[in-house]
Image (cartoon, rainbow, N blue to C red):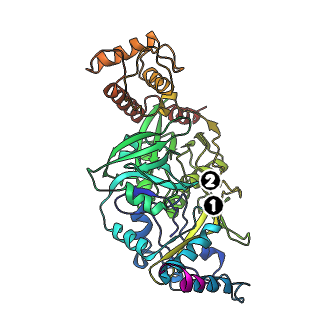
Amino acid sequence: MIYLWQSYISTGKTHHQIHTSWGEGMNLRKQHIIIILFAALLLGFAGAYFGVKLAQPDTLPEQIQETNKEEPNTSQDSSAPPENIEKVSQAFNLIKDNYLNDVDDKQLIEGAIQGMLTTLEDPYSSYMDVETMERFNETIESSFEGIGAEVSTVNGKVTIVAPIKDSPAEEAGLRPNDKILSVDDESVVGMDLYEAVEKIRGEKGSEVVLEIQRTGVSDPFDVKIVRDDIPVETVYSEVKTVDGKKTGVIEITTFSENTAKDFSKELKKLEDKNIEGLVIDVRGNPGGLLTAVEDILKNFIPKNMPYLQVENQKGEKSKSFSELEEKKPYPISVIIDEGSASASEILAVAMKEAGYDVVGTKSYGKGTVQQAVPMGDGSTIKLTFFKWLSPKGTWIHEKGVKPTEKVEQPDYYFTNPVQVEDSIAYNHTGDKVENVQVMLKGLDYKPGRTDGYFSKETEKAVQAFQADNDLEVTGEINEKTAGQIQAKIVEKVRDGDDDRQKEKALNVLYE
């Protein structure tokens, strides 16, 4: 079973994959049947469960169970040790014999492993020591609680890849590429991702304050989140009418154990209703289980082209094909955004290269493959082994999938929480004023301008908003007014009334 590595934050399951190991003589096809991990670690609940629980021997497909019987190949080849390897032992003995304080052997050995992985300058290759693995395993049996955001490490900063649909993180307005600088006033910059996630996740009902740095915003701001149950449903469908034509819309929030099965059920329901077109929405979907996206693609990519390729260290490629004779009889489009990663990108680029329209903005860009190898003592090394390629052999790593129809959302989709210490009023200027003006405009009030100058028109718009929302009508923005404006914006975004990307994806079907 193949997984796409993600990282969700919650109290429990880390979509961190403990996968099978592979013998030296195994062919590429067997190597393809491994766990594919993308973004970083699924340090969120739903993802973690699928990533780990499904990798246990009794749940693996027959091919993987066979492969799992082989001993891990922890050496690159059978050649002699590299030159100067004795320097490692020399350094070990030098420290043990002469360092001012006592040093534990285990500390030095694990530090050496960490150091080797660090020199790779690969954020997706990492080491989990015994203690980290024990904490991780303890989370497997926990409930689905947390903030619900998939994270990675980018330049030493914990970075949001995507919030989960209907999660506390989404409700709080977190979005892709947000950087988490501190957790409850404790800096997590440069901190090990596992350690940072331990601080972020927690029990349902507990509160956490994240300091967020957002591109385009001059100052960091705090986001207060109350942890809650993380939604486990991954497939949602509905029927829209476009130009008198029944059109199905299927949203996939993550690719988990039951996603492909649920997708097939929803697709059949829509086809039984005689839909004339289909939209597949993977915006904000950070990925998940590769077999899930493979099974979904088998519904749409004909057997005359691969739906995926995997390339090893030697440049050898393995291609995967469906048994589908021909495409569906109706048009299809896919919606993506910057929060669409890994498995979502596999789906999007395969559909794009098969001739379907892809609408939205450029995706995240994660195209490498990691394998987690147990070291025999309870610790694990996660190392980049492969890259995945599109049907035509394109590598989207750090580039993302470009849509065929680029569509940006309204400006208010990208506004930020406003922190108010002293009230903002007439004649004030700055980023906070501009942010509020854009939100007011998005809520159909008329601030007069959106350039950051608090004008008389803006004052009147604030007064109108306050009157409509049972707030004291002052024309000034205090903490309560700012919070209410932000809440209304989040509600409007979630309602999707001005969803330009979905509107285009629906209309492009019949153009």
Q: Position of residue 461 (x, y in %)?
A: 40, 14
Residue, x 56% and y 72% (percent of image)? 114
Q: Going from the N terminus, do you reach mark 1 or mark 2 first?
A: 1
Q: Amino acid at mark 2?
A: Ala
Whether residue 254 appears in this view of the structure is: yes
Quarter of the image holding residue 37? Answer: bottom right
Cα distance between the residues tagged 1 and 2: 7 Å
461 or 507, nearer to the observer: 461
50 or 309, nearer to the observer: 50
Residue corresponding to mark 1: 308
Residue corresponding to mark 2: 350
User: What element does badge 1 sit on?
Assistant: strand
Does residue 453 show up magenta in the picture? no
Residue, x 47% and y 57% (percent of image)? 255
Answer with left or right where residue 35 lies relative to residue 389: left
Q: Which mark is residue 443?
A: none
Does residue 97 show up magenta in the picture? yes
Residue, x 67% and y 59% (percent of image)? 304
Q: Residue furthest front?
A: 100
User: On the rendered image, what quadrant is the C terminus found in?
Assistant: top right
Answer with left or right where residue 130 lies relative to residue 208: right
67 or 136, nearer to the observer: 136
- Asked if the residues shown at circle 1 and circle 2 are in contact, with their CB atoms under 8 angstroms apart, the answer is yes
Q: Position of residue 38 (x, y in %)?
A: 55, 60
Question: How many C-alpha atoms fall within 10 Å of the one at disc 1: few (<14), some, or many (≥20)?
Answer: many
Give the residues in magenta: 94-103
Q: Position of residue 432 (x, y in %)?
A: 46, 27
237 or 317, nearer to the observer: 317
Question: How many C-alpha atoms fall within 10 Å of the one at disc 2: few (<14), some, or many (≥20)?
Answer: many
Whether residue 32 appears in this view of the structure is: no
Q: Amino acid at mark 1?
A: Leu
